Structure formats: structure tokens, C-alpha cells
Image: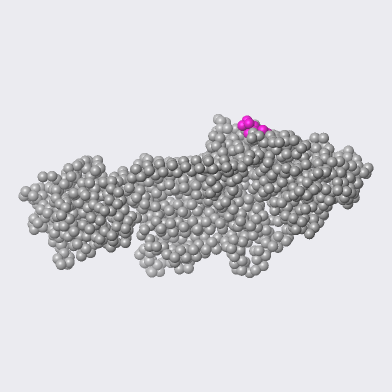
């Protein structure tokens, strides 16, 4: 089980891993800077946005003369067809983006970890049932789940988040299950069980602690992928309403004007790309750092 | 893992079981969401016939049966492909889906024909220089390609091409198709044009296919780049690669016939799964490029509150996923000589 | 007299997680043309690394120092390596595990084809024709092998096929890295006989890597003993076996099983130092029954004993 | 090996060369004679093409395939002959005689005659009476259609009416061939089989084009009817042989289609892109339409049930921004209920954007601060979307929260009708976009605000005085047109004071036309919304 090598078992271990990665990997540094910038935007966005009410989706009073301006010093990212400042919309939108992905990944991770560890620990019919459920949701991309939920529940935040959680938890369930299987079969876990240590304690103290690190690193990478899917769902109008401060929505707002006012869609889209890339870079270089074999540099020797 | 009839049958049964789960899920969505399931199923009918339509829907769903029989009834209805009439299209859902499937698949195939070879090639190049600056750049490129919102990339490609006066819109020029008497036979326009030896339509359809295909290809390119890099780099450390090098086998042969060949089964497996998920990407890009296909159905299902169409799409996408994954497993087994057939 | 291989203060190391671990340190030896030369040592002694260095297959994270010549060509100089035109043409290689050394995705015939087309530009038919000869030479029936995948062959057949592939290159120097370690005793004997015969018939230079002193005795004319990355003793096999100089060599000879019964090592407990450990003194210090004070602090240089033997020990 | 690659490349080049030569040589024999084609992008799915029943988007097909007895001329506000050559009415307007055109044939070759007229009028009227579907209410007054001879019909009415206007209506006034019954296997004109037959893509009209291919969700193809009676009058040798009506709901889609040369006439492009298209050499025809967008306020649900609150809302609507911001200049600010240029239009009957007044009304209404109102509108109209966001932003200044509920058309209709059955589930505000069936103010006022019009009166408005006023005006139209118009204006004033409904804007629809097609002004008519008279269109090849 190569992924169990180089693991960390505590928050300090994780920090240590991150520190090593920072020292060694340019890609990790670039990725964490992107992520930090995104988080900063999410925290500060509404306060630093030049036109905060534009950012929340309100049409400015002088919309007629402001509409459709290309990027200029006053509106660095230009304005949309209703005269709203695109920069403000992007800045304010960071918060909703972060909220969506953090919520989706944390809930899916918790759910998937629980299911995966239980399946590996209890085996038998529990295992079969949980694996089956995971398989069913693996076959359903978030977009079609969102379609069904959109028709059943109407537009809204809950549709995006629910559909994404439903489609992401099986990934964590699956990898937790694989790692947990390896851990459960280890001698000390067996001994602990034989010694009559309660299941809950064994699960938490031994299994979860060993399973979590690689799954957590996976989750960091996934934050980016979830953002991509959430934006797509919002872009298609399956999720948030059309004036929500969300990057996917702003891209949708500019969609009709992609040829005449490309800036409306291009800037928020670039932020989606940069954020997703940031999380991928961080997750990818952390995984590389956890597996020393992957760090080797080489010249082709033949 | 011997690839036997036994295995295939098991695999098929498993797929059907998963599909049953998917259908039950969609039924749960219909039943548990607020509002009358029959009204939703009938598509919010109006006018004098509304009461009758709702009654009809109630019978179709079997809402007066006990719950387990309701589910069985629904399963039978969906899995026999008899989803009734789409409100948006006033045609059987099954017919609407199959009619539009070819267009999306054509785009998807084109994208993977571009993305997988390109990504693999770049991945091999990166693997040969692992740890170097070229590798770093290529890996970042791979991540960036896989992190690009496909719908946005589609729009960007579209905007650029359009500004350059390149008509990447729709599937084929209507005027051209009419003037040359083009007929859609299989629904794969490139194939249809070839069958009818219709060169203008062939090239026109190709020119309109490539730009959206490029947008859809971003993800598989990035994925294959990263994957083939990892697999080839691993394979290059294999004992038989060392032996071959020691015997003086040329670099090109070692890389392709030895290392890449070893990476191929893994690549097929992962690309297969990605192919299934990219169906959604293709649908979104279709919408951006104004092409007919499954993507438009997604919007029509929303616009008309067409629950039947939505369930049809749900099941179609899941079935596609299962079928492609089974095929990928079989293909992987076929190209690995160690697997007994 | 032409030297097949000549190592001068050759060091080989691997880069692992920012650290550089030296697997072979300042090794010097020569192998004469048409000679059967054996390198003996426990696992981790660096003998396989030496074999890789000669065959030109050091892994990509390898680092070198010193100088190595193969067939008169400088292949290693400092950290520069150049095996262009050496691999397969001057030196060839029989790998350790037969199962892992054949490409599992290719039929044996194809593997011959790729080797021979790379080296001599042969067509597939010519390559197969030539392969038949070598397969027969290695004691295999060609038709039962050529269109088979490796996993369809038995272990012995795999190893014979690997030897045939190695021979088909036509190189005059054959490096065999424990080619029998994974085979049972019967097969092992057959393979050794085969190698002996081939050497006699074709006049090859044979460099044989093993941990088995007995095998070394049966096969080679000269032997080099390695311990913890260093060459501790070198000399004609018969002399070294009869009268070992280095305490480690003595230990190896004493531990040779007689009639399959492994004798316990009385005095020589302990493990060799791991390659990462910095050692100022003799690497064998911990296990050596005859250790002196100087052994703890200074590594013994190689000293000539007689006209054909060398040893690195403060006892001499 | 390298030689092998080279050989493969050479082989590929040879094969490709051979194939393309083959294609190119093969083609000329395959190419058909030049077909003049026009591709017209329409923005909605076709809901049906039954000439008597269809009351929605099907007009875009029906208008070219079928003909009415008369046609309305909006500029002169008169009717002109089509299938009827002349007509007259009795003194009191209760008996009308139409003399029909001779030598007209339907698409299947059967001759046009008085029987066809009788059948068509009666079917439209009876379907409406039986099921409430369609626009057959225009024939509501018709008591008897009498076939005098093959080319004369006499129509008796139960009350006086401008029947010539009805005969020019855009819905349910089309004449179809009696042969359709037999083809459909229908037992009578009301047999549902007939409707099914029509809606599966069959036509029985006499217009200049006939339906060749019918796929209501994606494409309808019309072909020139060579035996149409009017070709000699039109005298247009460049009229298209084939008209493809492409269903392109997305304005961007249409814009792209234009640029790609895929679409010759676009009915709906993003407004902000029209100037860009004009700069690229496309011709833009700005049609001032009778299509207007009327805001209806739910009078049956708190807080819009409070008159003062409604007036507060209406004075907080940014009237001054609507045309420039939401419509990008493509519209006329509404006044009263009826659109500009339509009989009965009243000028100057509009609210002002006046926050002080709005606050005053809000205070008087007694509705507490922080009120929330739901606003339903059709999601695929970009003007609606822009207006909705504008309204939300401005009402936020009054501390009124607007919950935007964009919906597809069918859902909008369902939500609107709910006001009569479950008013608290119906939205507070809703936009109804309307275009008339007949050129009478009654069309708008009855449908949108009469208490019996539960299908379209989404305000839930029920005012006997208003109802009586417009009914009286309608009956007077045949006898004293001026007095009728006065009463209609009176009715609109009542609505204005009650703050129940307001015409937000009349649409100016830019039809964008590509270079190879020429669409003369007379090919478009605001009453027959979206219908292009392709017989006047010229295709330059």
C-alpha cells in the first residue's frame, strides 16, 4: 500500500508536510498563493469591491450610460449589459464559490469516510450495501442529479449543494474503503478488537486516523473539481438564480454577449480556472510529497 | 482476472443492479419532493384535458399501489424504455433520446480522438524528463487543462473563432445540406456524409465539429497527460525495460513498445471512465455552440418541467457510464496478454 | 592484454529524498578479455550496482564518480555517463529475475525483433531466423517459444530465453546479475552449465554476480568480494577460496552450506551498515572478530598481496 | 522503420487525394437544381398548426400556409381583401355578406368555395364554445353562416360587430379545405382526429407556401405552392422555393447563426448586439409591434391586494430606465394597456418614477416595512430578465424585497392562472406579454382584465363597472366606432387609478436580415406577429 507511506497522523504532521512541499515544489508555492488569494477575496471581497452593490447583483442607478463598457481604469474588468461592474461581481462572488465548495467537500468527505470505514470494518452485508450505494451514485454525474432536483425543488443554493454532495461522497467512500481495508487487516487493529476495545474507539483511534490523511489530500484536489462542477451547474441555470453573485452565473450573464462583450464572461471564468488550478496544484504536489518515489528527478538514462 | 463469459455475465448483472438503483433514486426524487407526483409526471398540464392527464399519470406511476409495487411498476416502465410521451417534444421520450444521442456521441468521439493521443504523447514526453523544467511545465499544463471550466473554454474558443470569421456553429450548414440532398442516416453526420459521398457536407460538418471538440478535449488531454506521465515513468523503472536497454534496444522502441505499452491498460481504464463523465461536458459545449443533441434536451427538460425527459436523461447517462466502464474493462483485458481469455 | 572492463575508483550512488546514498564507493578492478570474473557479496553490498554500471542501466536517479571503461570505451567519468554504442554492442546483460526481465506485453519473437532491429536493423523475418539459433544455443526449442508471451513459459524457459536474448546481441562481454537466484537447484545447475558452455564456445567475457561463494568457485577464474559498497578482496578464485585474506571473505566461505545444511555463523553476528551511515572506519568493524584500534577510525586502503591478489584490511 | 513511416504517409496522401477527387467529380451529378432557400429563425417551439384552434406560436407557420378572408392594414386601420374580394354589412352591423375570390385552390388541389368558409368559421367558433380552446371567441356573435352560392356567404350575427375585423384576425380566422376531414378520417369538424391530423404536420390551406416537413421543436420546412392565386399579383420571381423555419429559442444562437450565414432572417437577437450586426452589414428592420408587456398585480393576495401598496410599487418602477437599460432602446414606453398605433391606445396614461410619492403611498398602505413580493416572468426573454433585475434593484430602495421567479412560458401561465384558485400561491407581480388576435381593444382588455377571463386575467381583477364598460364598447364597435373607443379609454383609466395593470412597454422587434435576402417592409405586419410574407421576400443568389 504505497499511499500509506509518508503519511501524516496529526495536524502538526500535515503542517510539516506542507512546509516540506513549500520548500521543494514551485508548483505547491504557486498553488498555495492562488488558493490564498482566493480565500482572501472571499473574506474581503465585499469590502474591497469598488461597487459592492453591483457585486451583489443590483443594477446601478446610472445603468444606461454604464452598460457594456470594456475594461478601463474605472472598471478594470468592464461592465455587463446592465452596467454592473464585473470586477465587483467577481470579488463578491468569491465568497459564494468558497462556501459552495467547502460545504460540498466537507459534507461529502464526512459522509464518504463514515461509509467507507464502516464498510471496511463491519464487512458482510453492510459492506455490500454501502458499496452498492456508492456505485449507484458514481454512475450519476452531478449535473443530471441537479436536473432532477431542479425540477423537483426549484432553483436555489440547496440544489447545487445537494446534487454535488450526492455525486461526490462515493469517491471518498471508495478511497476510504480501500485504505481502511488495509488498516483493518493490520495486526494491531486486530489485537485491539480482540482485546475488547469498543468498536467506536478502534474506528476513531486507529482506522480513521490512518485513513484520513490520503483522503484529505484527495479532498484538497477535489475542491477545484467541485468548483468546476458547481460553476457548470450554475451556468446552466440548474442551481442559483440569475442575479446571484456566483462566478458561473456571471459567466452565464455574459454568455449572450460573448462576441460583443467578451469581458463579462472571460474574467469570472478565468477566476474559476485559477482557483481550480490552485487547489489542484496544492493537492497534487502534496500527494507527490507524501510519496517519496514520485519526487525523484531524473534524466532519461538511455 | 480471467475474462470469461462468466465474468461478463456477472458484470452485466451488476450493471443492471446499479441501473435499478439509479431508477429507484429518480423515483424517490419524484415521490419525496413537494407537490403531487402525478401532476409532476404529467408535466403540469393545463386546460380542459388536465384532469384526465393527471389521472393518466397517476395510473402510469401506479400511485394507488402499495409502495414496493409502485417502485416495481416504475422500474418496469423505465427499464423497458417506455417512459411515455415527453411534454416538451410530444414524442416518446425514448425516441427523443435516441434521436439526439448520435450528435453528442459524435462530438464526444471527436474530442477523445484528439485528447487521448495528444495527452498521452505529452505525458510520455514529460515522463522522459521527470523532475525537469519541461516536466514541470507539462504537468502544470495538464492540471490547467483539467481545471478549465469546459463551458467557459467553449465560449472562449467560440468567441475567438467567431471574431476570426470562422462559422463554428450548429452541426452542418442547412443550405448546403438542402442543396446537396444530404440525409441524416445514422445521425453521425461525418459518417452519413461519407456514406453518401457528400464531400462538401463532410468538410462543413468537420469544420463545425472540430472547435467544440477541442473544448471538450481539454479535460481528457489534461487527464491523459498526467496519467500517462505517471504510468510511463513507473514502467520505465521496470526490470524488463532495464533489460531491454541493456540489450541495446533503441530509445524510441523502449519508450513506446515497452513503457507506453505497459501504461496502455491503465490508460484505457481511466480514459474510459472519463469518457463516460465527459458526456456531460459534451452536452454543455453543444449548448454553447448551438448544436443539436442531448444538451438541448437538458434545457428543454427544465423549460417544460418535463420530468419524463429528465428521468430519461438520468437513466441514459447512468447506462452510458455503466456500458462504457464495462467496455473499458473488457478492452483493458483484451490488450493485456496476461489475462486469460 | 586488452581489458574488458576497467573500474578506477568507481563510486555509484542514488539520490533519495534530497539525500545522496552511496551504494558503491571507490571500487577499482579490471576484467580481462575472455575471463570469467565473479563479484561476490551479500545483498546490499553494491555488487548489483556495479553490474548495472557495467551494463549501462543505472537508474535515472543514479549518481557516479570515478571512471569506468568497458571494452576500452570510457562510459563513466565523474558524473557523466555515456553508453552510446556500448549497450548491446560491447556489453550485454542477463538479468536477475527471469519473469520480470521479459516484456510481458510482447511475444518472445517480437522481443528478439526489437533487439536485433535496434542493433543491426534486421527485418522481422531475419530477426526470427537469428533468434532460432540463439534459442537453440540456450537449449530451447524455438517453435515452442517464439510466438509465446513470457507468462506462458516456465521459469527455467524464461531465464533461457533471457539468456538467448542477451546473447543475440552479439556483445562479447556478458554481465549476469544473479541469474539463478530465483530458480530451483536443478535449474540453477543447468543454467550454470549453460553459461559455462557458452563462454567456452563463444569465448565471451563473463562477469557473474552472486552471493554464493560455491557458485563463484565453480564458475570463475577470478573473484572480487564486496562488502557495504567496498571491494574488500580480489584475486584468483582458487586462491581466494583456499586461503581467504579478509575476515569477511573467510566468513562467506565458512557460511557456505555443505550438502544443503547452512552452518551457523558463530562469530559474525550483526548486520552490514546501511549505506546512509557515515563511517570513518572499516565498514566491517562491527562484525569483525580481529578488529584493531585503527579499524574504528580509518578505512583500510587496498593493498597488493602477492602478484595477483589485493585486500583492503589493516591486518595486512 | 523510418522508411515504413514514409511509405504510410505517402499511401495516406494518395488515398486522401483519390477520395477528394472522387468526391469532387461525383458531386456535380448529385447536385440538384438551384433551390432558393430562406432560413428564418423563430424563437419558440411551435405549439400546433391547427388553423382553427392554435392560439400561440403556431401562427408563424399558419400565417404563411393559410389565408383569412381579409387582412388588417395597421397603418390605415382598415381591412383589405384576401380570400374575400368584397364585403358589406347591413345598417346595424348584424348581417355581413362576403363575396369570395374565384380560382383559388387549396394545396391538395380542391377548389376554394363558400362551403370551406362556413366550415372554417363554424369549427373555430364551436371548438371555443365546447372546450374554451383557441380564439374562436372572435366568431362568438356569429349566429348563422349561410352559403348563398359557391362564392357568396352571408353571416348573421346575434349582436352588432365589426365582423370585417374578425375576418382579419390573426388566430382562428383561417380557412381550410373541407377535404381535410376525409383525410384525417374525422367524423365531423369537432372530431379530435382532425386536430391530431393537423398537428402531425399536415396542412389544408390555400396560402403561398405549404408544409413540407414539420418537426415543431426544431424545424418546419415550407415549400412554394406554385398554384397560389396571388403569384401574378405579387410578381416576385425571386421568392424563395423553400422556407426553413428554425426553432432557435436562444437569442445568442440566432446571432451566431446570422454571423455563420446559417440564418437569413433572425427574429430575436440579443438587443445589445443589434448595432454590431448593423455594423457588419446586416439589414435591421425595426418592427414596431402590437406585442406589449403588461405588468399585472395580484389583487387577491396581501400586500398587493392593498391599492395604495400597488400604487407605491407602480411609482417605484424605474419607468425612465426601462427603454434604455432593459430594452436597449428597442421599445416604446407603455401607456394605458393598449400598444401604440393600436385602435384605442391612450397617450399619457402612465405612472412616473417618483420615490417620494411611492413612499407616501407605502405609508398610507399600512404595509409594514420589509415587505416581500414575488415576481414571475418568462425566463427566456432577455428584456424580462433585465427588467426584473432593474425592478428588484429599485424596489430595494423602498426596502421592498423582490423575489425573482423566472419561469418557462408554460409555468408562467400556470402560476398566473392560480390567482383564481389559490391566490396566495400566485405571484404578486407577473408579466404577461400579449399580442392581439383581432384588431380591437376588446382583445386586450377582455383577455387580461375581464373577470370571466380566468385563463389570462392573472391579476384576479374583478370589477363589474369595468366589465360592463368594455362589453358595451365591444357591441358599439359595429355601430358607433368613435363612442366605442371613448369607452375603452374610460376603462383603461379605471385600471390606471386602481393600479391593477400597466403596460410596461411596446416591443420594437429588430428583425435582422442577412445579405442574400431582401425583406420588403410590407412583408411584416404587427398584427400577424412573427409572420413573414415570404411571397414578397427576394432571394439573391
Pinpoint residue D104: horizontal percent, then vertical percent: 79, 44
Q: From this viewpoint, is residue C228 visible? A: no
Question: Residue A203, located in which quarter of the rendered image?
Answer: bottom left
Pinpoint residue D221: horizontal percent, then vertical percent: 67, 46
Q: Residue at x 31, y 45 (%)?
A: B251
Viewer-nearest residue: B77 or C8: B77
Total marks in image = 0
Viewer-nearest residue: C36 or D365: C36
Pinpoint residue C253: horizontal percent, then vertical percent: 13, 59
Q: Residue at x 23, y 55 (%)?
A: C133
* Residue C176 within the magenta-colored segment of the rendering: no
* Residue D279 within the magenta-colored segment of the rendering: yes
Q: The N terminus of chain A lies in which quarter of the figure? A: bottom left
Q: Is residue B31 left or right of residue C4?
A: right
What residue span does the magenta drawing correspond to?
Answer: D277-284
Q: Residue furthest left?
A: C306
Q: Is residue A92 left or right of residue D127?
A: left
Q: Residue at x 54, y 53 (%)?
A: A142
Pinpoint residue D68: horizontal percent, then vertical percent: 80, 44
Amino acid at each position: 500500500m504505497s499511499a500509506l507511506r509518508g503519511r501524516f497522523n496529526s495536524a502538526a504532521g500535515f503542517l510539516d508536510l506542507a512546509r516540506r512541499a513549500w520548500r521543494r515544489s514551485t508548483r505547491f508555492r504557486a498553488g498555495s498563493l492562488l488558493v490564498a488569494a482566493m480565500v482572501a477575496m472571499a473574506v474581503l471581497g465585499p469590502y474591497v469591491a469598488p461597487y459592492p452593490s453591483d457585486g451583489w447583483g443590483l443594477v446601478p442607478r446610472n445603468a444606461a450610460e454604464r452598460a457594456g463598457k470594456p475594461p478601463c481604469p474605472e472598471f478594470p474588468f468592464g461592465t455587463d449589459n446592465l452596467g454592473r461592474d464585473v470586477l465587483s461581481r467577481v470579488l463578491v462572488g468569491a465568497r459564494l464559490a468558497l462556501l459552495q465548495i467547502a460545504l460540498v467537500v466537507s459534507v461529502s468527505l464526512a459522509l464518504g469516510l463514515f461509509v467507507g470505514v464502516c464498510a471496511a470494518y463491519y464487512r458482510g452485508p453492510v459492506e455490500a450495501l454501502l458499496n452498492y450505494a456508492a456505485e449507484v451514485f458514481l454512475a450519476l454525474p452531478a449535473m443530471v442529479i441537479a436536473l432532477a432536483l431542479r425540477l423537483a425543488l426549484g432553483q436555489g443554493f440547496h440544489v447545487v449543494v445537494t446534487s454535488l454532495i450526492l455525486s461526490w461522497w462515493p469517491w471518498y467512500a471508495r478511497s476510504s474503503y480501500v485504505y481502511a481495508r488495509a488498516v483493518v487487516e493490520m495486526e494491531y487493529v486486530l489485537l485491539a478488537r480482540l482485546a475488547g476495545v469498543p468498536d467506536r474507539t478502534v474506528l476513531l483511534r486507529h482506522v480513521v486516523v490512518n485513513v484520513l490523511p490520503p483522503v484529505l489530500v484527495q479532498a484538497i484536489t477535489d475542491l477545484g473539481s467541485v468548483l468546476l462542477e458547481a460553476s457548470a451547474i450554475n451556468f446552466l441555470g440548474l442551481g442559483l438564480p440569475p442575479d446571484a453573485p456566483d462566478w458561473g452565473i456571471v459567466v452565464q450573464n455574459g454568455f449572450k454577449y460573448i462576441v460583443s462583450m467578451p469581458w463579462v464572461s472571460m474574467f469570472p471564468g478565468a477566476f474559476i480556472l485559477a482557483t481550480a488550478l490552485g487547489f489542484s496544484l496544492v493537492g497534487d504536489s502534496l500527494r507527490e510529497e507524501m510519496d517519496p518515489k514520485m519526487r525523484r528527478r531524473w534524466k532519461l538514462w538511455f | 482476472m480471467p475474462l470469461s463469459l462468466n465474468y461478463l455475465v456477472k458484470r452485466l448483472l451488476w450493471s443492471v443492479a446499479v441501473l435499478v438503483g439509479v431508477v429507484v433514486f429518480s423515483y424517490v426524487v419524484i415521490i419525496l419532493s413537494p407537490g403531487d407526483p402525478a401532476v409532476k409526471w404529467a408535466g403540469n398540464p393545463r386546460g380542459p384535458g388536465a384532469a384526465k392527464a393527471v389521472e393518466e399519470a397517476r395510473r402510469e406511476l401506479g400511485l394507488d399501489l402499495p409502495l414496493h409495487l409502485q417502485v416495481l411498476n416504475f422500474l418496469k416502465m423505465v427499464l423497458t424504455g417506455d417512459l411515455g410521451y415527453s411534454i416538451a417534444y410530444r414524442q416518446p421520450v425514448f425516441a427523443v433520446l435516441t434521436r439526439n444521442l448520435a450528435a453528442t456521441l459524435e462530438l464526444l468521439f471527436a474530442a477523445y480522438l484528439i485528447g487521448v493521443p495528444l495527452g498521452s504523447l505529452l505525458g510520455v514526453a514529460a515522463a522522459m524528463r521527470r523532475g525537469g523544467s519541461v516536466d514541470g511545465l507539462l504537468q502544470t499544463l495538464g492540471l490547467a487543462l483539467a481545471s478549465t471550466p469546459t463551458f467557459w473554454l467553449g465560449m472562449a474558443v467560440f468567441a475567438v473563432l467567431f471574431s476570426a470569421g470562422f462559422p463554428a456553429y450548429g452541426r452542418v450548414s442547412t443550405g448546403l445540406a438542402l442543396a446537396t440532398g444530404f440525409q441524416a442516416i445514422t445521425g453521425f453526420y461525418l459518417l452519413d456524409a461519407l456514406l453518401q459521398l457528400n464531400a462538401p457536407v463532410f468538410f462543413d460538418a468537420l469544420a463545425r465539429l472540430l472547435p467544440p471538440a477541442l473544448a471538450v478535449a481539454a479535460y481528457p488531454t489534461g487527464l491523459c497527460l498526467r496519467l500517462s506521465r505517471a504510468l510511463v515513468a513507473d514502467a520505465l523503472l521496470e526490470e524488463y525495460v532495464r533489460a531491454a536497454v541493456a540489450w541495446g534496444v533503441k530509445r524510441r522502441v523502449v519508450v513506446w513498445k515497452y513503457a507506453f505499452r505497459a501504461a496502455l491498460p491503465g490508460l484505457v481504464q481511466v480514459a474510459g471512465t472519463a469518457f463516460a463523465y465527459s458526456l456531460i461536458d459534451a452536452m454543455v459545449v453543444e449548448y454553447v455552440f448551438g448544436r443539436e443533441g442531448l444538451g438541448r434536451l437538458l434545457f428543454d427538460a427544465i423549460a417544460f418541467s418535463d420530468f419524463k425527459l429528465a428521468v430519461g436523461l438520468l437513466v441514459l447517462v447512468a447506462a452510458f457510464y455503466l456500458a462504457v466502464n464495462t467496455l473499458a474493462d473488457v478492452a483493458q483485458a483484451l490488450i493485456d496478454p496476461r489475462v486469460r481469455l | 592484454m586488452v581489458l574488458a572492463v576497467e573500474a578506477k575508483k568507481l563510486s555509484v550512488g542514488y539520490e533519495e529524498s534530497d539525500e545522496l546514498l552511496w551504494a558503491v564507493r571507490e571500487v577499482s578492478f579490471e576484467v580481462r578479455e575472455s575471463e570469467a570474473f565473479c563479484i561476490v557479496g551479500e545483498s546490499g553490498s553494491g555488487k548489483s550496482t556495479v553490474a548495472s554500471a557495467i551494463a549501462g542501466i543505472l537508474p535515472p536517479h543514479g549518481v557516479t564518480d570515478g571512471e569506468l571503461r568497458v571494452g576500452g570505451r570510457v562510459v563513466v567519468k565523474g558524473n557523466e555517463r555515456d553508453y552510446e554504442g556500448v549497450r548491446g554492442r560491447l556489453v550485454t546483460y542477463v538479468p536477475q529475475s527471469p519473469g520480470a526481465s521479459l516484456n510481458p506485453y510482447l511475444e518472445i519473437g517480437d522481443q528478439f525483433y526489437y533487439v536485433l532491429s535496434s542493433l543491426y536493423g534486421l527485418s522481422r523475418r531475419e530477426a526470427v531466423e537469428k533468434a532460432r539459433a540463439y534459442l537453440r544455443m540456450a537449449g530451447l526449442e524455438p517453435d515452442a517459444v517464439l510466438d509465446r508471451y513470457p507468462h506462458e513459459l516456465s521459469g527455467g524457459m524464461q531465464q533461457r530465453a533471457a539468456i538467448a536474448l542477451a546473447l543475440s546481441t552479439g556483445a562479447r562481454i556478458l554481465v549476469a546479475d544473479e541469474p539463478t537466484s530465483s530458480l530451483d537447484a536443478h535449474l540453477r545447475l543447468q543454467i550454470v552449465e549453460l553459461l559455462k558452455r557458452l563462454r567456452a564456445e563463444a569465448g565471451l567475457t563473463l562477469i557473474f554476480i552472486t552471493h554464493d561463494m560455491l557458485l563463484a568457485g565453480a564458475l570463475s577464474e577470478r573473484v572480487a568480494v564486496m562488502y557495504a559498497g567496498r571491494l574488500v578482496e580480489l584475486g584468483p578464485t582458487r586462491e581466494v577460496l583456499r586461503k581467504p585474506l579478509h575476515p569477511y571473505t573467510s566468513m562467506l566461505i565458512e557460511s557456505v552450506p555443505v550438502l544443503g545444511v547452512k552452518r551457523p555463523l558463530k562469530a559474525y553476528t550483526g548486520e552490514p551498515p546501511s549505506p546512509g551511515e557515515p563511517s570513518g572506519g572499516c565498514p566491517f568493524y562491527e562484525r569483525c572478530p580481529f578488529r584493531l584500534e585503527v579499524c574504528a577510525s580509518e578505512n583500510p586502503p587496498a593493498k597488493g598481496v602477492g602478484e595477483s591478489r589485493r585486500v583492503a584490511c589493516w591486518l595486512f | 522503420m523510418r522508411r515504413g513511416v514514409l511509405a504510410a504517409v505517402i499511401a495516406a496522401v494518395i488515398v486522401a487525394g483519390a477520395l477528394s477527387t472522387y468526391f469532387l467529380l461525383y458531386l456535380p451529378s448529385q447536385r440538384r437544381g438551384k433551390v432558393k432557400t430562406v432560413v428564418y429563425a423563430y424563437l419558440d417551439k411551435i405549439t400546433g398548426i391547427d388553423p382553427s384552434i392554435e392560439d400561440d406560436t403556431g401562427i408563424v407557420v399558419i400565417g404563411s400556409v393559410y389565408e383569412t378572408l381579409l387582412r388588417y392594414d395597421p397603418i390605415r386601420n382598415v381591412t383589405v381583401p384576401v380570400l374575400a374580394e368584397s364585403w358589406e354589412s347591413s345598417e346595424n352591423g348584424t348581417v355581413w355578406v362576403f363575396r369570395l375570390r374565384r380560382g383559388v385552390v387549396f394545396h391538395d388541389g380542391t377548389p376554394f368555395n363558400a362551403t370551406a368558409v362556413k366550415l372554417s368559421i363554424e369549427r373555430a367558433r364551436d371548438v371555443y364554445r365546447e372546450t374554451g380552446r383557441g380564439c374562436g371567441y372572435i366568431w362568438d356573435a356569429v349566429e348563422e353562416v349561410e352559403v348563398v352560392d359557391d362564392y357568396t356567404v352571408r353571416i348573421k350575427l346575434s349582436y352588432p360587430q365589426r365582423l370585417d375585423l374578425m375576418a382579419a384576425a390573426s388566430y382562428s380566422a383561417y380557412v381550410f379545405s373541407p377535404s381535410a376531414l376525409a383525410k384525417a378520417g374525422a367524423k365531423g369538424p369537432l372530431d379530435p382526429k382532425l386536430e391530431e391530423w393537423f398537428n402531425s404536420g399536415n396542412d389544408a390551406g390555400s396560402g403561398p407556401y405549404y408544409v413540407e416537413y414539420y418537426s415543431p421543436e426544431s424545424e418546419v420546412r415550407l415549400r412554394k405552392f406554385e398554384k397560389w392565386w396571388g403569384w401574378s399579383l405579387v410578381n416576385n420571381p425571386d421568392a424563395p422555393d423553400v422556407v426553413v423555419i428554425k426553432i432557435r429559442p436562444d437569442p445568442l444562437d440566432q446571432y451566431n447563426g446570422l454571423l455563420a450565414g446559417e440564418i437569413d432572417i433572425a427574429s430575436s437577437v440579443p438587443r445589445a448586439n443589434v448595432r454590431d450586426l448593423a455594423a457588419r452589414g446586416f439589414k435591421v428592420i425595426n418592427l414596431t409591434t402590437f406585442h406589449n408587456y403588461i405588468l399585472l398585480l395580484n389583487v387577491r393576495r396581501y400586500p398587493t391586494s392593498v391599492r395604495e401598496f400597488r400604487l407605491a410599487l407602480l411609482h417605484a418602477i424605474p419607468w425612465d430606465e426601462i427603454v434604455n437599460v432593459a430594452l436597449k432602446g428597442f421599445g416604446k414606453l407603455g401607456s394605458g394597456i393598449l400598444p401604440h398605433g393600436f385602435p384605442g391606445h391612450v397617450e399619457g396614461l402612465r405612472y412616473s418614477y417618483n420615490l417620494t410619492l411611492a413612499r407616501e403611498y407605502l405609508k398610507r398602505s399600512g404595509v409594514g416595512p420589509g415587505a416581500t413580493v414575488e415576481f414571475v416572468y418568462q425566463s427566456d426573454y432577455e428584456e424580462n430578465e433585465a427588467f426584473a433585475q432593474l425592478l428588484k434593484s429599485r424596489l430595494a430602495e423602498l426596502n421592498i424585497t423582490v423575489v425573482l421567479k423566472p419561469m418557462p412560458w408554460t409555468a408562467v401561465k400556470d402560476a398566473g392562472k392560480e390567482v383564481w384558485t389559490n391566490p396566495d400561491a400566485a405571484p404578486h407581480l407577473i408579466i404577461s406579454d400579449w399580442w392581439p388576435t383581432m384588431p380591437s381593444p376588446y382583445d386586450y382588455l377582455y383577455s387580461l382584465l375581464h373577470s370571466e377571463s380566468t385563463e389570462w386575467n392573472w391579476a384576479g381583477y374583478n370589477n363589474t363597472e369595468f366589465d360592463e364598460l368594455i362589453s358595451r364598447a365591444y357591441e358599439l364597435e359595429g355601430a358607433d366606432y368613435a363612442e366605442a373607443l371613448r369607452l375603452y379609454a374610460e376603462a383603461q383609466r379605471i385600471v390606471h387609478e386602481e393600479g391593477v395593470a400597466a403596460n410596461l412597454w411596446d416591443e420594437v422587434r429588430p428583425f435582422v436580415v442577412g445579405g442574400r435576402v431582401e425583406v420588403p417592409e410590407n412583408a411584416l405586419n404587427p398584427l400577424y406577429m412573427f409572420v413573414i410574407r415570404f411571397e414578397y421576400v427576394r432571394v439573391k443568389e
